[in-house]
Amino acid sequence: QVQLVESGGGLVQAGGSLRLSCAASGNIFSINAMGWYRQAPGKQRERVASITAGGTTTYAGSVKGRFTISRDNAKNTVYLQMNNLKPEDTAVYYCAADILRSTGGTSPYWGQGTQVTVSS
């Protein structure tokens, strides 16, 4: 069994910063790509940022220059540093990872989500 547990969400004023963390644990042999997604009320889930096992990153245009994704492969953890937050960044943030299990097979896994609220 594989689990992804997020932390670091909360309430912040516009212009502030938050750092999200997501730790994977369980039946893990290796982790391929990891990423962060978000879903605002009444909107579809969208990809925010992703990072490959080798460290190549991609970002949604709306967060480029403000958010930074990183990972610690030794800890099976991915981070999202969010700076200069805007009210439109308010959403539930989910982490995702493409995981090769120790028992074989690769599947995508999702965290439970963490709320980020940015007040104006």
Image (spheres, helix red, strand yellow):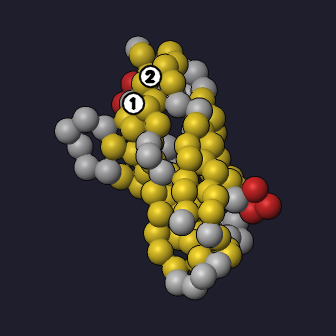
Q: Of helix, strand and loop, which one carries label 1?
A: loop
Q: Please report the residue visible at 39 percent of the width from the left and 38 percent of the height from the top.
A: 92
**Front residue of this view, candidates 3 and 51:** 3
Residue, disc 2: 118
Cα separation between marks 1 and 2: 5 Å
User: Looking at the image, can residue 45 be seen?
Assistant: yes
Q: Residue furthest right?
A: 74
Please say if 104 is above or below 42. Answer: below
Quadrant of the image containing the C terminus: top left
Q: Please report the residue visible at 54 percent of the width from the left and 57 percent of the height from the top.
A: 3
Dots 1 and 2: beta carbons under 8 Å? yes
Residue, disc 1: 90
Position in image of residue 118 (x %, y %): 44, 22
Q: Of helix, strand and loop, which one carries label 2?
A: strand
In the rendered structure, which amino acid carries the disc numbered 1? Thr
Position in image of residue 65 (x %, y %): 58, 43
- Disc 1: CA contacts within 10 A as few (<14), some (14-19) or many (>=20): many
Q: Please report the residue visible at 64 percent of the width from the left and 58 percent of the height from the top.
A: 25
